[in-house]
Image (spheres, helix red, strand yellow):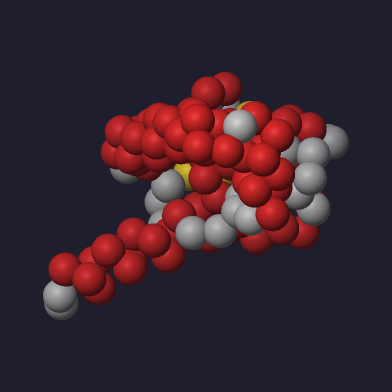
Amino acid sequence: MSTLCKFETALEILVGKWKPVILLQLFANGTMRFSELQKAIPDITKKMLTQQLRELQYHDIIHREVYNQIPPKVEYSITEYGQQLTPLLQAMNDWGTAHIAHLQELYGEEHSARSLKRN
């Protein structure tokens, strides 16, 4: 397997608008219930949140704990394996912060904010 294929494998796990956001919420807050994730990420639909959580669970990035009670209780947390993503997500966050500052230097506050919303 070439290096590029390995890179693509990593991207498949993290690509998309919501997975990094979900992971950052779980890293920042620890264990969270489904409803807490929905409130923390108000623009995500219930269906999309469910799909993204299932994919992350499949890859052993997050753990889903179901409690046998009424009403049902489900909690999500980062697995020990998933903790390995910490430096990667931190680096992405740091770069994003620096990029926003860079755009502001190039184009000014209003223009840089507008260009980020288009993406």
Residue 89 visible? The answer is no
Name above or below for residue 96 compared with residue 53. above
> In x, y percent, where is residue 119?
64, 55
Residue shown at 53%/23% (left/top)? 28
Name above or below for residue 72 compared with residue 18. above
Residue shown at 35%/35% (left/top)? 91
In this rendering, would 91 be left or right of 28? left
How many numbered discs?
0
In this rendering, would 46 be left or right of 102? right
Quadrant into which the N terminus falls: bottom left
Residue 38 sits in which quadrant?
top right
Residue 76 sits in which quadrant?
top right
Residue shown at 77%/59% (left/top)? 47
Residue shown at 57%/27% (left/top)? 31
**Foreground residue, 3 or 29?**
3
> In x, y percent, where is residue 90?
38, 31
> In x, y percent, where is residue 8?
33, 68
Residue furthest top as drawn: 29
In this rendering, would 5 be left or right of 90? left
Residue 16 sits in which quadrant?
bottom right
Residue 17 visible? The answer is yes
Residue furthest left as drawn: 2
**Foreground residue, 18 or 113?**
113
Name above or below for residue 4 compared with residue 47. below
Residue furthest right as drawn: 71
